Image (cartoon, rainbow, N blue to C red):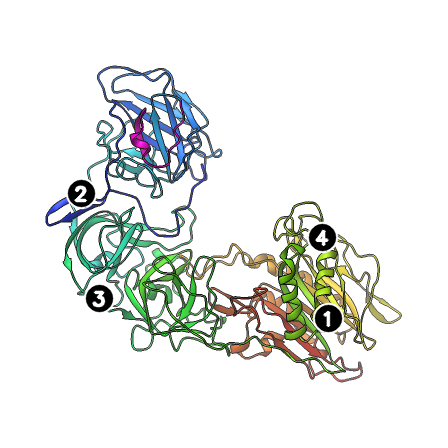
Amino acid sequence: MSALQRPRRLGAVAVTTSLVLSGVSVLGTTPALAASSTVVITEVYGGGGNSGASHTHDFIELTNNGSAAVDLTGWSIQYASATGSSWTNKINLSGTIAPGGVYLAQGATGGANGVPLPTPDATGTVNMSGTAGKVALVSSTTSLTCSTGCATLPGVVDFVGYGTTASSSETAPAPAPSNTTSVTRKVPTVDADNNSTEFAAVPPTPKTLTSTPPDPDPVDARIHQIQGATHLSPLNGQFVGNVTGVVTAKTTNGFWFQDPEPDADPATSDGLFVFTGSAPSVVVGNSVVVKGKVTEFRPGGSGGSDNLTITELTQPEVTITGTAPVPAATIVGPGGRVPPAKVIEDDSNGDVETTGTYEPATDGIDFWESLEGMWLGLDQPGVTGLRSSFGELPVVPAGSGTRTVRGGIVLLKDDNNPERIMLDDVLAPIPTAKVGDKLAGVVTGVLDYSFGNFKLQVSQTPTVVDGGLQREKTRASHAAQISVATFNVENLDPSDGPAKFNGLAQAIVQNLASPDILALEEVQDNDGAVNSGTTAADVTLNTLTAAIRAAGGPAYQWRQIDPVNNAEGGEPGGNIRVAFLFRKDRPVRFVDRPGGGSTVATTVVQKHGKLQLSASPGRVDPANPAWAAARVPLAGEFTWLGDPLFVVANHFSSKGGDDPLWGRTQPPVRSSEVKRHQQARSVRGFVDQILSKDARANVIVLGDINDFDFAETTDILVGSGNTALIDLPRTLKDAERYSYVFEGNSQILDQILMSRNLLPGHAYDIVHMNSEFPDQISDHDPQVVRVTPVPRWWPFP
């Protein structure tokens, strides 16, 4: 009963596509008909009991359109997933169904939501998808074994495939239902063997036969009238006809077409997607006239998805009238349509689709909406991020935003980079590239939207022009300096193999210049994601320190505390944690003081006039709810040339669950911030234990904070007054403030903060060697600060 998500290509309800050539209408697919019978399936509902469901159970409804009773004993209702071939999920039937009678078969439930069904005539545990699947009425209880062609098999009395991905149906699949709608036969007494035209997605009416009014006569419309100067079409839900245009691109379940005579309003798009449900018969360059229903399709489903909708034509009838040149691509960027410079959306306080404001000239989300479905061009766009596992590559037009010193684009407090757009691989493969590269010539495609981002579906694979970016190396600290670094090593465990350990070792030795103290994040236990109960990470850390030695680096020791098994989030079974490495050949010493443990809080005590930790290494505030299902910070007491240094390694909770920048909720709700604010207060409270006793104590707080330099999380960590910490990313120019690249935005997630007395003569470096490169050993850039602890009598800076 799971609500299956559709594949990574847009569309809406599946319907029969009529293709008209020279005035002759031809069905786009060959009908696949079930055996003739008076008993037919009239309704299918798979959302039973799910969140928001109207009824507690799945059900299938039958009726007898004959003049005599039909004995159903020995028959069965069988179900298979949308593309599956297993039909063992079924309900065996018994009893008779009278002429004109209704027979209700009750299936499984997905929860306690909804109202109970009327008394069923048969029950079973058939568990159906609420959005896509296949249902067969069979005159035996022998399970089918097909995936395609099922409707014509011997013994199949009636058949319904529903949802766009159904691999078998009568002619074409019925529209996709939901938790609040069923697939219902429009006229219960008519069976013309065409699921797509005979069924509608409407509120369920179990054991009550209903009729759906016929489709209204279409209204003539142009593409720009359908798109409108708004996110939702002013003609949404209406049937339109005589919609003319030229086919610009096609995919497996539809095509885009564009009006060659656009209107003069830049706020209205002149391109549109036509959802055919199967491979369309048109080709690029066909002039077409389309009749269909205006539909707003929301990728990911209508329930709970924060995606914007895509305006489409569904249930189409397509007439090819000839051929024509594809309209010239509308250039986005210099010399063409220039995106807003900073603002994604600043007028909405909720659902941007219903806010009543629409300003493409100033709001990026409205700007790209005004180009939805159009044939666009980007002239030599710059690459600002890496190709994702879904084949998406972020780029920006020339002259965009605050660019990094290395060719990326920086996320700032007042600039979310609305110029940024994803290139996607639905129509052509996307190449591998690194930040700072460019793409040659004009990159063309149609504008699409899915998974929280506007995307240009490119018509052909772009050519990458190498930007020459090289991995950075920091310099080594001199004799009087201590270097302290942080490095997220991305779920490191022994199963990663020698290549990753050797790569990290080379990075630590060559790029980080073998720092004196290194805080590591995302260290996993000795068997990684295997959920064995193991929590120790000695093999992981020994393997890394051995690899550093083999790479020509110094001997490192390590300190850490094993977490409670499966209690601190991360990959299940991995027991992720933070750890310290420190050099044995430099005048840095770790002060080992017993008493630390996974659930024991270390505190700051004063003995003989000196501050020290009650346990070193020790965990910071582990009982605080802020650290539930999160990595507890690790505090270590070090000395450098005899001077004490307190270091706190952190890995705050991630941004998972936050609204996307380009979602319909504007401004985006960052729900994950609440947890990080609690964590920042916890760490700040520990720092205050130190600095309230000695404002000149040497303190460094560092790690993967999972938040921006301008975020409230960082403000809390910084604090105020004489005990305020210095947030080192804030000391850099905007173009240098990044340690991570997400969807093409270069941003700060990793940070180093330190007490004020360490500021004189410090040198801070974010070492860009991972986040901008496709062949990375971690998705984070490490960073290092070199400081010279000053004598206690030295005046405050």
Using the image, tell me which numbered label, if any, was put on residue 563.
4
Amino acid type, mark 4: Pro
Give the mark nearer the N terminus: 1 vs 3. Answer: 3
> Which quarter of the picture shows residue 445?
bottom left
Q: Earlier in the sequence, mark 4 or mark 3?
A: 3
**What are the residue bounds of the magenta stretch?**
142-160
Position of the N terminus by quadrant: top left
Viewer-side label of 4, 2? 4
Give the labeled residue for mark 2: 216
At horizontal 40% and vertical 31% (from top left) the residue drawn is: 145
Name the mark on residue 517. 1
Label 2, label 3: how far apart the Cα atoms are: 32 Å
Q: Secondary structure at mark 1?
A: strand
The residue lying toward the viewer, choosing from 796 and 577, is 577
Q: Residue at x 34, y 29 (%)?
A: 136
Q: Amino acid at mark 2?
A: Pro
Dot 3 falls on a residue whose secondary structure is: loop
Residue appearing at x 63%, y 52% in the figure: 569
